[in-house]
Amino acid sequence: MPHRWPAQLWIVRHGESAGNVAREQAMASGLTHIDIADRDVDVALSARGEQQATALGQWFAEMPADERPQVLLVSPYRRAQRTAELIQAAGGMDPKAEGLVLDERLREKEFGVLDRLTTAGIAEFHPDQYEFRRLLGKFYHRPPAGESWCDVILRLRSAVDTMCLHHDGCRVLIVAHQVVVMCLRYLLENMTEEEILAIDRSGDLANCSVTEYRFDPDKGRHGALALHRYNFVAPMTEGGAPVTSEPDANVAAR
């Protein structure tokens, strides 16, 4: 009987990006805007992010070939693509694996008019949105021209269905973004709003951290994916790469 799920699923947040660094500097200086010239889709990895992605690829490469990921699904954003490329270059994929597959449904949450603003910037330039966000919470608040967490979850439902249809029984690696990792947990574990936001409040997801699921045939009527580990950073520490957990550049709107 088909699994109806991948046999194993790893979900990885991209390595540290130039946007993560710029956001940290803006917050430390009390600025209203994050100083980064590129579109969010074009933000590159930092030097530390490249180290992290290579260390993660080496961690996968230490597995037997028949235990490494067979399928690589990636957000089209530059920082996620580069992370995936470095994992591949380090030998982190099954030798029989095909190239990475870009899927726009795995892209970062869109922030609309709040793009590049710190929390202070939102309060100063969009006080109405600041108040709406406080009243509605991040799960339901949709900034003008942006997305709520629910909007992200809606597109991810489709991505999960596609993954299960085309990669049933396979070992799948997804490289995406912090909000995407959280929203996939919400979907795969059938969580409530309160449950996923409690996890989100417990701390930021480390760059290149691993969230892993394994198929459990005894879970549910037809089996399902069961969480094996979350926010796992040993690949970085073992590989000598720095562990960073800066929120994405648009964390105020996240």
Image (cartoon, rainbow, N blue to C red):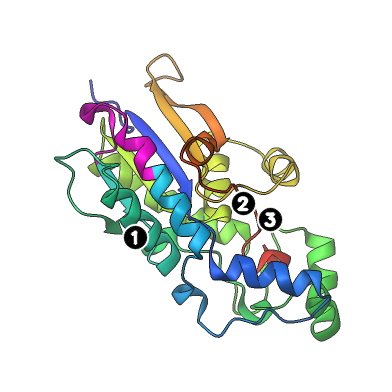
Q: In screen coordinates, is 251 left or right of 157?
A: right
How many badges with numbers are in the image? 3
**On the rendered image, what quadrant is the C terminus found in?**
bottom right
The local crowd at label 1, few if under 14, some if 14 to 19, many if 20 or more residues have their Cα within 10 Å, is some
**On the rendered image, what quadrant is the N terminus found in?**
top left
Residue topped by disc 2: 244
Give the image location of residue 184, x and y in percent. Answer: 51, 45
Disc on the earlier residue, 1 or 2 = 1
Work out which residue is located at the far left of the displayed protein and give it. 96
Point 46% across, 74% down: residue:
41
Residue topped by disc 1: 103
Q: In screen coordinates, is 210 left or right of 59?
A: right
Q: Nearer the viewer, residue 150 or 123?
A: 123
The residue range painted magenta reads 57-70
Determine whether 78 is above or below 137 in the image. Answer: below
- Disc 3 is placed on an element classified as loop
Please check the rendered image and state whether residue 8 is part of the magenta-colored stretch, yes or no.
Answer: no
